[in-house]
Image: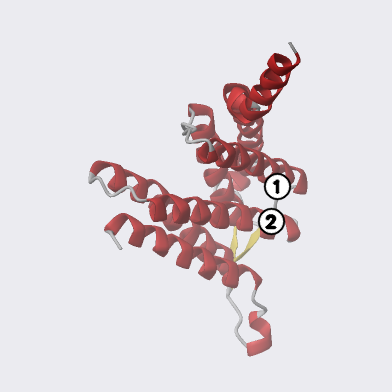
Amino acid sequence: MNLANKITMVRIFLTVLLIVLLLFPFYMVNIEFPKILIGTISVDIKYFIAAGIFAIASITDALDGHIARSRNMVTDFGKMTDAIADKMLVNSTLIILSSQGMISPVITVIIVFRDTVVDTIKMIAGSKGKVVAAIKTGKVKTTFLMLGIIFTLCYNLPFELFNLDVSNFLLILATVFALISGIQYYVMNKDIIFEREQKKETVKEEAQK
C-alpha cells in the first residue's frame, strides 16, 4: 500500500472515529464531555473535538490526491477507496447533524442526492471506458460544504457572537453549487449516458430500411 492510499485509510479511520464521537451515548458509560460558556453560548466540547477531526480528515482529502498525482501513485484501489472515504466523511456527517437538528434536512437530501447522481454518471462512464473529469463548481461546492460543516460543529463561532449566521450561509452556497455542478455533470456527459441506447436505435432504424 503506497503513501497516498495510507492517507486515504487514515481518513476512513478518522471518519469512523467522528461517527462514534457524534453518535455514541457516552453517558451510558459515565463519560461526560465538559461544557463551557462562550459569551451567552453554552458549548459542548465534544463538537469542537468533532470539528477538529473533521478538519484533519478534510485536509487528508486534498493531500492524498496531490501525493498520488505528483508521485505517480494513482491506483484503482486508491481511486475506489478515495471515493468511498469522501462520501463516508461528508455524507455521514451531514446525516448525523441533520438528525440532531444542527443542519437542515433539505440541505442534506439535496447534497446526498446530487452526489448519488454524479457517482452514477461516473460509474456509467467508467463502464464504457470514459473518464468524467472533475469540474470547478464541484470543487467549490466541496470547499463551501466542508467549511460549513466545520463552523456548524463549532456552533458558528466566533460569528454567532455577532449574530452572523456564517455556517448556514456556507451550507446554502454549497447546496447551490451542488445543484449547479450536478446539472453540469449531467449536461456534459448525457451523450455518454445514453450512448448505448442511441446506438441500438440507430441499428434498429438501419435494419428496418
Image point 62% across, 58% down: which residue?
92
Where is the N terminus found, in terms of image quarters?
bottom left
The residue lying toward the viewer, choosing from 141 and 129, is 129
Specify the quadrant of the image occupied by residue 102.
bottom right
Q: Position of residue 62 (x, y in %)?
A: 39, 46
Specify the quadrant of the image occupied by residue 43.
bottom right
Looking at the image, residue 8 sits to the left or right of residue 200; the answer is left
Residue under label 2, please give it: 95
165 above or below 41? Answer: above
Image point 29% across, 42% down: which residue?
69
Q: CA distance from mark 1 to mark 2?
A: 6 Å
Q: Are marks 1 and 2 in contact (CB under 8 Å)?
A: yes
The residue lying toward the viewer, choosing from 131 and 49, is 131
Looking at the image, residue 146 sits to the left or right of residue 190; the answer is left
Q: Residues within 10 Å of mark 1 (few under 14, many from 20)?
A: many
Specify the quadrant of the image occupied by residue 208.
top right
Residue 108 is marked as 1
Mark 2: amino acid: Ile
Label 1, secondary structure: give it. Answer: helix
